[in-house]
Image (cartoon, helix red, strand yellow):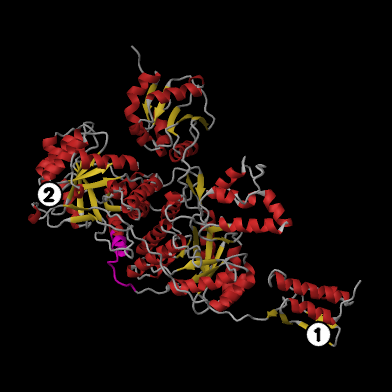
Amino acid sequence: MKVKSPLEIYKLLPQTNCGECGFDTCMSFAAHILDRSAKIEDCKPLVEQAKKSKKVAEKLKKLKEMTAPEIDEVIIGKDLKIGGEEVLHRHELTFFNPTALFFDVSDIMDEKTIDERCSRVVEYKKFYVGRYLTLDGIAVRSVSNNPDKFAEVVKKVSGYGKPIVLISLNPDCIKKALDFVTNPLIYAANEENWKEMLKIAKKNKVPVVVRSKDLDMLKSLAATFKKYEVPVVLDPVTEPAGRGLQKTFERVIQIRRTAILGQDKDINCPIMVTPISAWAMKADEIAKIYWETVIASLFIVKYADIMILHSLEPHTIMPIVTLRANIYTDPRTPVQVEPGLRAINNPDRNSPVLITTNFALTYYTVESDLQSSGASGWLLVLDTGGLGVEVSVAGGQFTPEKVKQLMEETKVAEKVDHRYLVIPGLAARLQGALEDEIGWKVLVGPTDSGRLKAWLEENWPPKKEIKN
Amino acid sequence: MSKLTFEDILKLLSKYNIEELEGVEIEGDIEIEIEGLPNLQAIGMELGMAAYHLARAAMMLGFPFQQLLQPQKPIEVKQKEEELELIKKKFEPYKVEWSGYVEEVQLGATKKDGGTRDYVIKLGGEKSLPFYIFDSEQPNLPAISIDVFDRPVPLPKVVRMHYEDVMENPEDWAKKVVKEFNADAVTIHLISTDPLLDDTPVNEAVKVVEDVLQAVKCPIIVGGSGNKEKDPILLEKVAEVAEGERVLLASATLDMDWERIGRAAKEHNHVVLAWTQMDINSQRTLNRYLLKKVGLPRDSLVMDPTTAALGYGLDYAFSNMERARIAALKGDEDLAFPVSSGTTNAWGAREAWMKESPLEGDSSWGMREHRGPLWEIVTGLTLALAAVDIFMMMHPVSVAVLKELIQTLGGKKEEVECEDWIAVV
């Protein structure tokens, strides 16, 4: 956004510190607008007054302009947001709207295939750091070039309730399909068809992808569509291999860099990349699958706001959705959970006591592994400042003293009748020192909590030691 | 109630920029017929309003309008068309120039430099972000080294199948990764020296280094076991026996005798890998110690800011490397060194090697034969875009795919003819 200091925003706020926005002061509200954790519309008094006073309305308009993101935010379907980015490198702030992943069906696929592909998009989920990673939408491709046929497939696909991209360079196909779907993204307007596409977009108020390898033409198309207030997405054309892929990389970076650093307001739009292009290569299927994943990964890191993909193989989707989750993780918030004691699957006085760290990734992995193993247990969560087991053991954040303190605070000794603590395999080297410190017997568990189930089956309850 | 005349209706319509209404017939001066009702949403708000006004006007004039409400087809309204013209624009790319550059470091030495390698690898030398060859030429593209161990190691099945025949013999292992898997360099990890493993004595362990130097003619990297006490002694000895070969000694860390490793490298013409745990300030400190306290030449330092696997902290590793590289390009000389990545770490992620998800809620994870290599590829390529100059990897397919990408983004590939994907069947 244009503003660099909360003061610039504060000047235009009511300055009454009424607190209706949820922040104590207007200054604090301004600071939150700056880091995008609040929106100008959250200032209810300002919005209300703007309805009555022209002067306040002007202020509100100015504030909106000042705080608009560097890259336009475009909405597809009901509420899928793409773009809205502020920076070139995630450590400078954060990236906001994760690259939207659309998977194609074509109007010459048989019904069964279409249903199967749509279902996969709708149903896909992968557990990651306390939530499920999912897919965003379906791109319907006209291969038949027959408007009726295309519209029929679009109608069917829209029944799945996912956001939709309509793919055809033939305006008649798009026109027909628009009767059956709400606010799809139109793909694509190019040098030849742009007039027709612009008419359709104006009339239906839908976002449009403009497409050209020639960046002068791409910019001209974007400027023209923007003039008519059509939300624009840029497709600088993804060439899948060789020199063409290098040039694609160059185009994408030049566009985003010129939009943000060069303040070029004609091309400050979300960017579309089409890893599906890999399927146009002359290669075998395995090669296409690998290369599609490579192209997708490349542009998840570098600036793609929306993508069209083909492969719905789970082994290609998983690296892509995981990478997207990583790159779009907010680096400003430490990925930590509350330390303490968690009861998993209704543990009793004989259930094992285990320990892990408060690094969110570690914690959720262990927790979900325990949950789904069906075993019950007491899970101690140690505050390591958000570090994983291996690093915190090496770095001195996972120490016997801290474990002892946590056990005292949580009074875990009062909850069980035994005196055994299971530690992660990666913390094995602490075993002796830990036993000395806490006076419990310490058992070394597996290095990967995915193996906890089998480990517990074998080692719990612990075999009684023979005392002499 | 005021009465509207036909003229009023026309006036009303003219407000909405409508020339004619298709499907509306006006006979005489008062008869109005409308075919169906307009679909308000389909024709947009403004025109919808116009049609609405028209309908209201008709009712006021006393016509049985309600009878005509059976929806048939929407009224097509022709708007006075504005001539659309393309706003011609020129795209002017924003120019970025950096004041700093990354040091160029040579691994391996040929006969003329006092070594016995067939070729050398140059790392670094960048004056712009990785693969931004449109900003400035990238003198050296990233290289790939493949990991070899001095004793059999537990490996995921998908990786192990490629090395089962050579695991007992590091020389054969090294030959295989060069000849069959196209490695630019070989990393020999002397893990058997670990006191908790075989505790191989240093003098014995370094023989493997001599054997590997005989077996392959590419530059080599030598790693210890990670034991803080033994590694400095071990790497010092490696430096001696590999005199002049410009071996990359892996690694010196802040919590061991880095000075000993640095001095040995300086004395015997090698390169030091400075490894820190994802902390840019520690990296600066360690680099500075090696340069200032030991006097290691600037062209003999490579840094390893730590590689975390995809899904397991890759975001930290990426931003840490990207920040370090941007700092270097902005002129921070303490960070202006080539970067190494232990990309093999990707195989530590359960998603890379497990047969299926241990969680019931997950969709299928798919075939691990492909999932594993892809996990390594994606980990590597992400970090390639941040800063990496040399990768240490394991799966042959991952190596091949990443090499292809490096060559492609480095501008070394020809044009490839391809159809447009839009209509691909």
Using the rendered image, report if marks 1 and 2 lie on a common chain.
yes
Residue at the disc numbered 1: B26
Q: Position of residue B183 (x, y in %)?
A: 22, 55
Q: Position of residue B226 (x, y in %)?
A: 24, 37
Q: Secondary structure at mark 1?
A: strand
Q: Position of residue B59 (x, y in %)?
A: 86, 74
Query: For residue A405: magenta?
Result: no
Residue displayed at 67% across by 81% down: B80
A175 and A3: which is toward the camera: A3
Label count reads 2
- Chain bearing tag 1 is B
Residue at the disc numbered 2: B245
Q: Which portion, as a residue range, is magenta? A: B403-416
- Chain bearing tag 2 is B
**Which mark sits nearer the N-terminus, 1 or 2?**
1
Residue displayed at 7% across by 55% down: B111
Q: Amino acid at mark 1?
A: Ile
Q: Is residue A451 left or right of residue B126?
A: right
Q: Position of residue A113 (x, y in %)?
A: 51, 64
